Image (tube, rainbow, N blue to C red):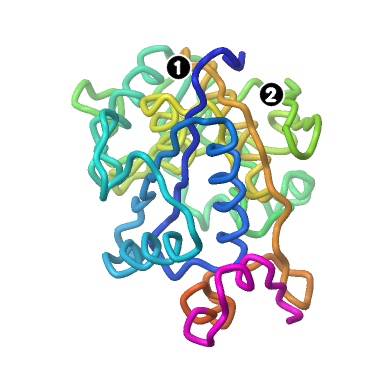
């Protein structure tokens, strides 16, 4: 259930794994506009969970580039606030508490499958229909390690000390349709077990997944509306299930149309020529960056 009575709290959540591009600029600008139009609070949160790709220079560049575009925020790593810290790398205890709750209530289970194992299972004829459509999306898990009941859990993974060196997956309610009314894109519908399967909430390297970290942070920071790209619509269905399991209130959702390159492919940080930083160097103004298209 979405709580529409709460004071507006939005967020900007860049990942400092490269320079932000024009697609990020458009989405973050919409988030900024909506927060300011609502007279609400805007939170800056650095999603720096990836230790191999996150860099301090990208953190500074994101803050600088967004300020240059005319955006500001009320809470964040550079401003402080009552819901900090505002970098995910410093919020491990928040994620561990969420993992413990899911574990205690039987929503998750340990998984020993590697990416190679999952790919091999999905290549079998009877599993072919379960492939994810987005190459960047988590593939539909074939259920290799899924226990029939809590009594069938691997006892070596049932540790009071935490998740240990296991992957942990959320058991989705197979066949249930997850629907939500997106403010920008209308009613969305995804079927658990068909459009997405049991998904990762904790990785064997000791890190929470994007899905768990996002849900735990949005709840802890009292976020009432999430503005992000349309490539994360399916993630929203997963996060609705996590919110329900954890007893969190769903924020409102606003998914923005993606900015595509000249080949119709969504932009990524490898598009260096379309990074905000490079466009600034080329002499573009903030208005020109926000209005830029790859064809230009």
Q: Would you call the spot at circle 1 few (<14 residues within 10 Å), some (14-19), or many (20 or more)?
A: some
Which residue in the structure is indicated by mark 2? 174
**Callout 2–callout 1 Cβ contact below 8 Å:** no
Screen quadrant of the C terminus: bottom right
Q: Would you call the spot at circle 2 few (<14 residues within 10 Å), some (14-19), or many (20 or more)?
A: few
Residue 216 found in image quarter: top left
Judged left or right of residue 115, residue 195 is right
Q: Is residue 184 above or below residue 267?
A: above
* Mark number, residue 40: none
Q: Residue furthest bottom?
A: 282
Q: Which residues are magenta?
A: 280-296
Membership of 287 in magenta stretch: yes
Which residue in the structure is indicated by mark 1? 246
- Residue 244, percent from left and from top: 54, 16
- The residue sitting at 33% across, 45% down in the picture is 204
- Residue 60, percent from left and from top: 31, 64
Q: Secondary structure at mark 2?
A: loop
């Amino acid at each position: 259930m979405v709580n529409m009575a709460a004071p507006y709290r939005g967020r900007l959540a860049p990942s400092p794994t490269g320079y932000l591009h024009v697609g990020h600029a458009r989405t973050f600008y919409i988030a900024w506009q909506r927060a300011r139009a609502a007279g609400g609070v805007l939170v800056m949160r650095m999603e720096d969970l990836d230790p191999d790709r996150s860099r301090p220079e990208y953190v500074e560049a994101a803050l600088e580039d967004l300020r240059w575009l005319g955006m500001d925020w009320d809470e964040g790593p550079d401003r402080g606030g009552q819901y900090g810290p505002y970098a995910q790398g410093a919020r491990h205890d928040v994620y561990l508490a969420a993992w413990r709750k899911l574990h205690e209530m039987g929503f998750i289970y340990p998984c020993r499958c590697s990416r190679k194992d999952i790919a091999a299972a999905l290549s079998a004829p009877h599993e072919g229909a379960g492939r994810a459509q987005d190459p960047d999306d988590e593939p539909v898990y074939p259920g290799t390690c899924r226990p029939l009941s809590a009594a069938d859990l691997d006892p070596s993974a049932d540790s009071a000390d935490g998740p240990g060196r296991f992957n942990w997956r959320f058991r989705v309610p197979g066949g249930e349709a997850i629907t939500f009314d997106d403010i920008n894109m209308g009613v969305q519908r995804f079927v658990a077990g068909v459009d997405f399967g049991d998904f990762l909430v904790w990785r064997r390297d000791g890190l929470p997944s994007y899905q768990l970290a996002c849900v735990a942070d949005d709840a802890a920071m009292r976020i009432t509306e999430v503005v992000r790209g349309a490539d994360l619509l399916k993630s929203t269905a997963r996060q609705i299930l996590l919110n329900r399991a954890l007893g969190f209130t769903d924020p409102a959702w606003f998914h923005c149309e993606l900015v595509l390159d000249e080949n119709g492919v969504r932009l990524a940080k490898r598009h260096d020529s379309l990074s905000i930083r490079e466009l600034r160097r080329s002499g573009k103004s903030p208005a020109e960056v926000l209005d830029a298209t790859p064809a230009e």
